[in-house]
Image: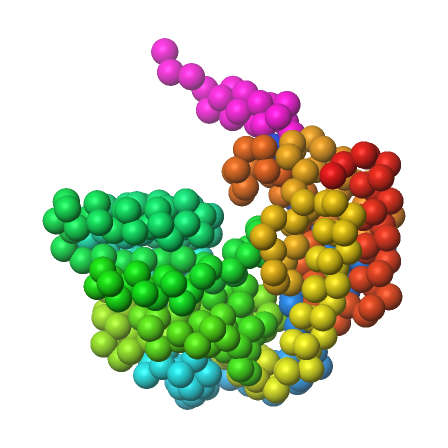
Amino acid sequence: MSESWESTLREETGAWAERHLLRTLIPAQQAGQTVLIREGRRLLNFSSNNYLGLATHPELGMAVAESVSQGIGGVASRLIIGHNEETEALEREIARFKGTEAALLFPNGYMANLGLLSALLKPSDAVFSDQYNHASIVDGIRLSGAQSYRYRHLNLDHLEVLLKRADAKGAKRKLIVTDSVFSMDGDVVPLSDLVQLKRKYNAALVLDEAHAAGVWGPGGAGMAHHLGVAEDVDLHMGTFSKAFGVYGAYVAGKKEWIQYLLNRCRPLIYTTALPPVLVAAIRASLRLVEAGDNLRRDLHERSAWFRQKLQEAGLSIGGSTTQIVPWIVGESELAIKLSQALAEEGVLAVAIRPPTVPEGQSRLRFSLMATHTKADVERAVAAVLRVAEQGAVR
């Protein structure tokens, strides 16, 4: 006799709760601002990906208001009904922003990665992925059916071993895919060395710039531009839901690559187009990002000071060198207790637990915004040090 769905679901969720891994949804107000309201508390917001603080910028609201007459929602796939001139203009602007020949809009970063990897890769191909890459990359590889090789985090020696192994097994084509800034660790891929491997083994390179676009590089173009290797990247993926403060994603590269995706990428072909109001907001945000050198400067300065103070206190922040700063504490139960203690101090830093991070590496993830004042950051650091001292956590 088969088991009932209800009993097995209760059993599994109960097991998650016992291991302090059960997740719940909590309403929050003003979530894009430096101070939000959650469960009746006003909390300094150190958990948002709104890195440049643009989510509440008045110019985005104005762009939306001015475009309402074009329609609130999407009406069909772009390949069915076509697209409006704003969408075509935005894709040209993205290509210029990234220094590529062409670009495509996607509803979000998850669908972009899922779509481009499943479209490009075939079972005869080999794909090489950093073990800490985003779940959308993992799922896109699974869907493709390609020969999958996961290399140890940022370990290019291990990557080279796997590239040689794939050659020995007769892989038809090879593709390397990686985040540029890793979302839970705040560390950065050694792109210059990675590019050398790409050339040596005649592989393609797909770079996920979700947490770098807008924050790094000239005009916020991304980490590949910051490190001077953008031309060696075959496809650049990025999102508008983080530093840009809006929603949506893009893939940019040579015309042949983009044309191929337009014809083979199922999440693009079978998805309703982004609504005109959202396209207008993205265009406005892109202009703000390109002119946002002062915002980037403030963000980098605040982040560097924050990292320094946690390190001086002996707290483990891994290899973070960016606006994402983990406080790695180990066990899930401890991470939850520390997050709750910080909330009592008026600071929101959410506990990140498996499977988002490996077992034994639960953490509090701090993400800074350019709109955090020096006083905000000082207050957060003081709260962290008090909580660490009370919990005797290093």
Give the left or right position of residue 103, taking residue 324 as reference.
left
Q: Is residue 39 visible?
A: no
Residue at (42, 65) in percent of width and height:
191
Q: Nearer the viewer, residue 165 or 215?
A: 165
Name the quarter where the C terminus is drawn: top right
Q: Nearer the viewer, residue 314 or 392?
A: 314
Give the left or right position of residue 316, taking residue 284 as reference.
right
Q: Is residue 11 magenta?
A: yes
Give the left or right position of residue 378, taking residue 291 as reference.
right
Number of callouts: 0
Q: Nearer the viewer, residue 134 or 360?
A: 360
Q: Is residue 140 magenta?
A: no
Name the quarter where the N terminus is drawn: top left
Q: Nearer the viewer, residue 52 or 88?
A: 52
Residue at (78, 48) in percent of width and height:
313
Q: Tell me where the magenta segment starts and ends, as one range.
A: 1-20
- Where residue 303 sits: x, y (%)? 70, 64
- Where residue 265 sits: x, y (%)? 29, 63
- Where residue 180 sits: x, y (%)? 47, 62
Colouring method of the image? rainbow
Give the left or right position of residue 184, taking residue 79 as reference.
right
Residue at (69, 31) in percent of width and height:
333
- Where residue 284 sits: x, y (%)? 58, 84
Looking at the image, the residue that sits furthest to the top is 1
Res. 380 image quadrant: bottom right
Depicted 389 relative to depicted 20: above or below = below
Depicted 303 relative to depicted 133: above or below = below
Q: Is residue 52 visible?
A: yes
Res. 256 image quadrant: bottom left
